[in-house]
Structures are given as structure tokens and as C-alpha cells.
Image (cartoon, rainbow, N blue to C red):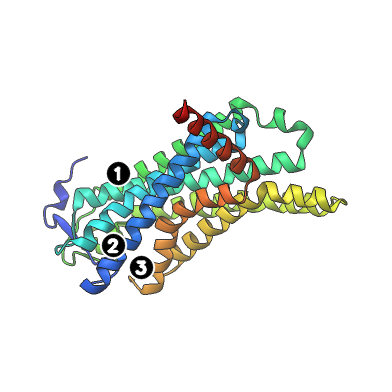
Amino acid sequence: MALGNHSTITEFLLLGLSADPHVQAPLFVLFLGIYLLTIVGNLMLLLVIKVDSHLHTPMYFFLSHLSFVDLCFSSVTVPKMLESLLSQRKTISVKGCLAQVFFVFVTAGTEACLLSVMAYDRYAAICHPLLYGQIMSKQLYMHFAWGSWGLGFLDALINILLAVNMVFCGAQIIHHYSCEMPSLLHLSCSDISRNLIALLCSTLLHGLGTFLLVFLSYTRIISTILSITSTSSRSKAFSTCSSHLTAVILYYGSGLLRHLLPNSGSPIELIFSVQYTVVTPMLNPLIYSMKNKEVKVALKRTLEKYLQHIRY
């Protein structure tokens, strides 16, 4: 990608979460702890799904991809945030900023697609339990997973190819702790009409489009659950999708609120951004392990095997 058009500006200033040195040190400790928990939690979930044959189903196949996406999503933004909290000069190069924008697009878009296909999986399991094996065939769920990655990558590629032609001049300040496309568009002094169209299409596809699929799936799921006469059967059916529903609410709730707010670097905007890009990737493995009986049992089996292996 040719970056000759960026000769006027070679780097941006990331204002981060706070300019107060007394606040930066506690924030560094807090977000380092969150990042380490994110890595450990998602790696643990990936390991358990990999080694336990009871979890080799479409639902947990999607969950393993979600855990990997969360690892990547958090790693795109948090290390740079931690560096800025310790550094006096909180800058990022134009190339580095564009790279961060690209990977934010890939991971955020892929996660949205994965959450929507996981909702479809729960719809098939609850609304058509006898046909579930035929509906969610191995070929189909493999296509769903890799298609989610493909759409995320394609979306990112289109947006970043348009972004490299933008000219930046004048203000170099990004009122945020990471680079996102709306921040770059705000700093550009060239024509950004094509960039805005591409960003709008991305929002419609990965934001409203995937949310609509989730909404339609859960409309059918809730309707089916309410029609079940047995209280125990109704509770069991709801428990199979409660973890995913919690993850959906966290991701879409904070993500949509973040993008609906003006790009001003206000405290409330930063709070929703932190929830969206930092906290949610940490919470997902906790949600799926604490609220899911199968994962808890599999985790126990895995730990017992590991302890036996060490003992002998």
C-alpha cells in the first residue's frame, strides 16, 4: 500500500484515557490485569474445547472461533493502550494507526458475524431439535465460521484500501486510546465521501445486518420456549441460549452505543469503547464457563486429566 499521500503527517497523538500521571499508573495495573485475564480465559476455553470430545459440536466450534477472535480483538488495542499509559510521548505512526484500524475491522466484523450464526445455531437446536443434525451439518457450520472471517477480512480490506488515499494535515490529535475509522475521517483534509459510503455499508452489514439476524433468531427461540408447557423443559431450553444471549447484549449494547455517540473523546464514549473492545473479550469466556454446565464439566475433566498426568 503506497503511503506517499501521508507525507504531511507522519504520526498521530493518542490522548488516551487520562493525562494525569497519578491516574495513569492505576489504570495501567487495571488494564494489564484485564488483558491477562482475557488471554488466560480465552486460551483456557480454546484448550478445553479442543481436548474434550464432548464439546466437538457446532455450538462449541463457533465458541472456539469466538474465543480466538476475542484474543485478537483485545490484542489489537490493549497493548498500545498500556504503552501509552507508561509513555510520555503518546504517539502512533500513520502506518501503525492504519494497521490498527484494519485489524479492528477484521476482529469486530468477524465477531458480529459469529454471534449471528451462533444465534442461528441456537434457533436450530431449540426450534428444530429433531432436525438439528441435518440443519447444522459439518459442511454448513464450517462455511458459517470461515465465511464470518472472510466477510470481516473483506470489509476491512475495502475500508483500508480507501483509507490509504486520505491526506492528513493540520490537527494530529486523536481523542481516544486507539485508532478507529471515524477518528481518522475526522482528521482528513481530503475528500472522504467514498470512505463514508464504505463505512456506512460496513455498519449496515456488520452492525444492523447481523443484529437483525440475531433478533429474528431469538424472536423464534423465545416464541418456541414460551409454547413449552413443562416448566423444567422450558428452563432447560432457555439455559442452552442464556450464555450466548448475555454475550450478544454486552457486545451489541456497548458497540452500538459507542458508534451512535459523536466522535468527541467524551468520558461516556471512552467508557463504552472500553466495554466494547477491552472488557467484553474478558467477560465472554467467564460467561460461557460460569453459565454453561457442559463447559464447567469439561473444564473439570480437563483439569483432572492434567493433574493425573502430572502425578504419574
Say left or right for 278 vs 136. Answer: left
User: Real-space Cα distance between discs 1 and 2?
Assistant: 34 Å
Say left or right for 17 vs 245. Answer: left
User: Real-space Cα distance between discs 3 and 2?
Assistant: 24 Å
Q: Position of residue 216 (x, y in %)?
A: 67, 51
* Residue type at the position of mark 3: Asn
Specify the farthest residue to the right: 229
Q: Quadrant of residue 180?
A: bottom left
Quadrant of the frame with the N terminus:
top left
Question: Can you identify the residue that label 2 sits on?
Answer: 28
Question: Can you identify the residue that label 3 sits on?
Answer: 263
Residue drawn 45% across the image and 53% down it: 282
Q: Is residue 20 visible?
A: no
Residue drawn 40% across the image and 39% down it: 153
Question: Can you identify the residue that label 1 sits on?
Answer: 161
- Could you say which is closer to the camera, residue 225 or residue 201? 225
